[in-house]
Amino acid sequence: MNKRKILTLLAALFCAVTSFAQDARQIVERMNATMDKLQPTGLEMAIDARIPIIGTVRSQVWALAGKQKNITLIGKKKQITWSDGQSIWDYDEKSQTVSIRKDKPTAKGENVGLFEDILSGYDLSVKEEQAKVWVITCKKSKSNQETDVPKRMILIVEKGSYKPVSLEAHSSMGITFTMHDIKFGVTDKDVTFDPAECNGATIKDYRQ
């Protein structure tokens, strides 16, 4: 192969890689636009956290208009937390108590913010294109000086709808978070404290 053909091939490969990177950013931009549009309807997702020594912690999260409900399973122990920006309710199944404390209002949940941070703090590339989804690699940019954000993430986006399918985040501490089964459409009842879910637990109010 002569030098001209080699240069032509390298140029073609460079263009292909550049186009791939641009496509990844465009996909994430459209995903964020879709999430912004659907955000008012509420968000539900499952979160698996694989933690060294401890093992896997599983959570189910519902979020709507500043309110949130989390069901967390650590082994056989279940904990349910509700928050509305003013108060937070913690139900501990083992002790059969509900603790109520003051809460700080947040515009958006931390989990949603992780999706939004992808564009500003990560280098993106399409790792794989499947029939129904894109698999996107998100590597922390050298310019990203945040120390408490994941160093690498794998994002899967559904074609057509541009909805997120899953997000796997790897931290520098060896912890892996996987957000999956992401759905939109939550009712106020889904995120409001319900004593009936606490099996007659003792309620302790610490807000005063």
Image (cartoon, helix red, strand yellow):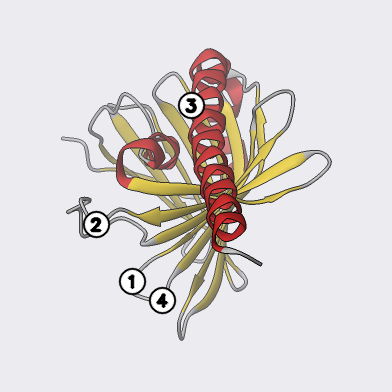
Asked if disc 1 and disc 4 are in contact, CB closer than 8 Å, the reply is yes
Q: Nearer the viewer, mark 1 or mark 3?
A: 3
Residue bearing mark 4? 174
Q: Marks 2/4: CA distance?
A: 20 Å
Q: Which mark is residue 172?
A: 1
Between residue 26 and residue 105, name the one nearer to us. Answer: 26
Task: Give the left or right position of residue 30, taking residue 51 as reference.
Answer: right
Q: Is residue 91 visible?
A: yes
Please, which residue is most extreme toward the bottom here? 53
Q: Quadrant of residue 6?
A: bottom right
**Label 2 SS:** loop
Q: Are marks 1 and 2 in contact (CB under 8 Å)?
A: no
Q: Which residue is mark 3?
A: 29
Q: Earlier in the sequence, mark 2 or mark 3?
A: 3
Per the image, the residue denoted by label 2 is 142
Give above or below for 23 relative to 122.
Answer: above
Q: Is residue 171 left or right of residue 161?
A: left
Circles 2, 3 touching at the beta carbon (< 8 Å)? no
Q: CA distance from mark 1 to mark 4?
A: 5 Å
Q: 25 or 150: nearer the eye?
A: 25
